[in-house]
Image: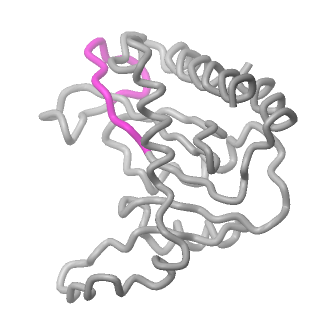
Amino acid sequence: MMEVLLRFSNRTRRIQWAWQSIDSRSGAAPLGGEATGKNPTDRARSGSKIHLLVGRRGAPIAVEITAANQADKTMVCEVVVAIAAKRPTQQHHFCADRGYDYSDVHTFVLGAGYTPHIKHRRRRGEAAAPPGDVPGEASFPARRWVVERTFNWLLKRRSLRTRWCKKAGNWLALVQLACAHILCDMAIYG
């Protein structure tokens, strides 16, 4: 259903592929089950994570779920490959936060035809950069807020805040259904 509504939304309102943002959100999974793990931000309780890739206006393009203890950088390839519609061949911009600042992520993003805009993660022993000294930040400001807004739209649904499904496929279906609802609203109401 998400693929159909993504194509419909692309035909009616033209998904803006030029800027894409990725992020993840961890949530509690008290019943456990498939694709759950110890949540590092919730005192090692059982949890799951939603990985979401959105377009410039916040339209969900791809979604995947994993255990809460899986690093964000490991899912970049799977999320980009899971894009439900055919992506135009022009150059795109890829926005991400510090959790994705690794050399293998940069290599994959460049190979996939994106211009990376990944926030720099300061390494141990590295001197702090002076404020306003991030290259490209003035001409291409961060557009990561759109994925946060889409997560807020998703979390309006009570069943997505806390995972109550033991089977990972059932919870992924609920997340995709919520993304399809967001796409439908964006296609109809703008």
x and y, in percent, of residue 28 in the image: 28, 24
x and y, in percent, of residue 174 in the image: 54, 15
Left or right: 34, with 77 as reference point? left
Quadrant for the C terminus in the image: top right
Q: Residue at x 48, y 75 (%)?
A: 103
Figure colour scheme:
one colour
Left or right: 170, with 131 as reference point? right
x and y, in percent, of residue 156 in the image: 41, 19
Q: Residue furthest left?
A: 43
Based on the picture, tell me whether residue 166 belongs to the magenta stretch. Answer: no
Between 14 and 50, the one lying in front of the other is 14
Between 119 and 171, the one lying in front of the other is 119
How many numbered circles does the render carry?
0
Between 48 and 12, the one lying in front of the other is 12
Q: Residue at x 40, y 60 (%)?
A: 97
x and y, in percent, of residue 167 in the image: 48, 14
Q: Residue at x 34, y 83 (%)?
A: 132
Q: Residue furthest front?
A: 189
Looking at the rendering, the stretch of residues picked out in magenta corresponds to 24-36
Is 158 drawn above or below residue 19 in the view shown? Answer: above
Q: Residue at x 43, y 42 (%)?
A: 148
Main structural element of the magenta stretch: helix, strand or loop?
loop
Is 15 drawn above or below residue 166 in the view shown? Answer: below
Based on the picture, tell me whether residue 29 belongs to the magenta stretch. Answer: yes
Quadrant for the N terminus in the image: top right
Left or right: 110, with 166 as reference point? right
Between 73 and 84, the one lying in front of the other is 84
Left or right: 87, with 145 as reference point? right
Is 174 drawn above or below residue 119 in the view shown? Answer: above
